[in-house]
Image: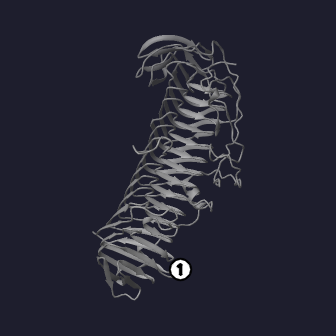
Amino acid sequence: MLRRRLILAAAPLTLAGLVLAGCATQAAAPSGAVSLSTDDTSTPEATVVVDSDLSAAAVLAANADVTVVRDDEWSDADAADIALDGDSASSDSDAVTVDGATVTITGAGVFRLSGSLDGQVVVAAPEDAQVVLILDDAEISASDSPAITVMTADDVALQLADGSQNAVSDASSYADDAGANAAIYADADLTVSGTGSLTVSGNGNDGIASTDDLVVLSGEITVEAVDDALRGKDSLTVEGGTVVLEAGGDALKSDQTDDATQGFVAITGGDVVATSGDDAIAAATDAVITGGTIALTAGTAATGSDDSPKGVSAGAVVAIDGGDVSVEAADDGVHSDGSVGIGGGTLTVTSGDDGIHAEQRLEIRDGAVTVAESVEGLEATDIAISGGTVDVTSSDDGINAAGATASTAAQGGGMGGGEQDTGETLTISGGTVRLAATGDGLDSNGSIAITGGTTVVSGPSSAGGQGAVDANGSVAVDGGELFVAGSVLVTPTGAQQWVAATVSGSAGDTVEVTDAAGAAIASFEADQSFGAVFYSGPGLTDGGAYTVTVNGVSATTVTEGVAVSGGAGGGPGSGRRP
């Protein structure tokens, strides 16, 4: 079943003007709907109401409430002791039974487990029971089952006693139809907290898994699993603690597909280090980050060639409004089958494909976003940057507004037009954007509008059918500052003046624009070699004469609004502003 929930149709922009052609022809998604998978040809079951707010608070508010057991809801003074002793155990509690190496808890309450057990602990309490398991230097090793299995209960908490060191491990394999198949498995809501440590070895499948909500509040938690490390089917939340995960599959996962308000992963604090063979964060609906320090590595040496490990993957929305997040991914760094919203925090991405990819809308309102390595830096059907800082390095397009039904047949189409405007939008209204691209710098299969902020585009160094600013529709510059050092120049529309010059230079060179009196109007540093430059900003006057210098050496004198032929491969030719 396709997942549909928060998807955003961008408001149309009325733009007109001349453009550079050459980007791929892609069909735009219909307004109010989005294709959630480029490989899925099934018919969607429903189309949801568009929600234009991609803030983390709004995304979480639209989701189901998370069930969590806080420390103030119980007292360790009420704990009944369970002494683990090799292949047996003992307890004075009437709610505890011991059958060989299996310890079963049949009632609500608080239970303290200490010692070592070569067996398993089972919770089979009433459906309305709250059960708290205090792990106090407990080691549980199961050879043919999970180490801890919650069969029935309402809410269960694992409390890591202060200063304690705890470890659990499970069977080396499970039957394909096994229901409980994790080192810690709960068919109930599960909360992990405390100030001790917990080491989990998921030898047969997952590390810690809950069929309901899984919440980590605190503790030092280390999980190594052959498949998923942490999996909360209804939701997975990390509020704090130190969490170190190594997974052959996904590291943090929520996969509920029957309820559109569930299936989300939320990280609001703590220190998380995750290494995964598949996705580091995999959410059926939403992946939300509002705090914490998070280091994600997706795609290990064991990853198969057919896999596409992503750093953060969501079926509906990725919302990042805080935290310090670093991602290294073999495929996309951040990926959403719906939309991505970034409103704060620090995000650094190194990716083998797109740095940040959304099938529908990508918006950056605030925060510091760095795509240090990518094929395409930012890609979505509609892209809106209104604040923050964005720094992108790409081997192809820096920022690409392209639809979800991409066709690569028209890639590298070169100059001359002829490609249809398919409705995508790229809008920069604020913030600071810096791009170093081998392909197109700013690219849209529809239109481009710049109304504010500071945008610096370096590249491409040679033409080859690529352009620094490239659109199938209009390119309108009505505010802000746009600096370009590349190979092909654009002739924009819009109210703001501009100058263009055929001058050459190298990476690290400083390009400066001065007026007839010698006063500096603008300057910027190029990140790649270039054969032409372009500048548009509020300091220019209509029809004025300007001098362009490279590293302080006068290169040429140009007239505002007059296009020039592009360097290193040619451009659109000369002409006045239309």
Which image quarter: residue 171?
A: bottom left
Seen at 54% across and 51% down, the residue is 319
User: Which structural element holds mark 1?
Assistant: loop
Question: Foreground: 266 or 304?
Answer: 304
Image location (x, y in percent) of residue 420: 71, 28
Q: Quadrant of residue 147?
A: bottom left
- Name the residue: 68% across, 22% down: 18
x, y percentage for residue 84? 30, 77
How crowded pointer 1 is (Cα within 10 Å; few <14, some 14-19, many 20+) is rated as: some
Say left or right for 338 vs 179: right
Image quarter (top left, top right, bottom left or bottom right) of the N terminus: bottom right
- Report the residue at 61% width, 15% height from top: 563
Query: Please, what is the three-letter code of the amino acid marked with disc 1?
Result: Glu
Residue 338 is at least partly visible in this image: yes
Q: Is residue 420 left or right of residue 442?
A: right
Which color scheme is applied? one colour
State which quadrant residue 165 falls in. bottom left
Q: Is residue 75 visible?
A: no
Where does residue 396 sit, x and y in percent of width and height?
52, 29
Q: Height in image: 450 above or below 342?
A: above
Question: Which quadrant holds the C terminus?
Answer: top right
State whether residue 265 is above or below residue 436. below
Q: Position of residue 118 (x, y in %)?
A: 32, 72
Figure check: 463 above or below 315: above
- In this view, the residue in front, 164 or 523, is 164
Which residue is disc 1 drawn over? 127
In-front residue for pair 226/224? 226
Total number of numbered discs in the rendering: 1
Residue 514 higher or lower than 471, as above or below: above
Q: Is residue 497 left or right of residue 82?
A: right
Nearer the observer, 140 or 408 = 140
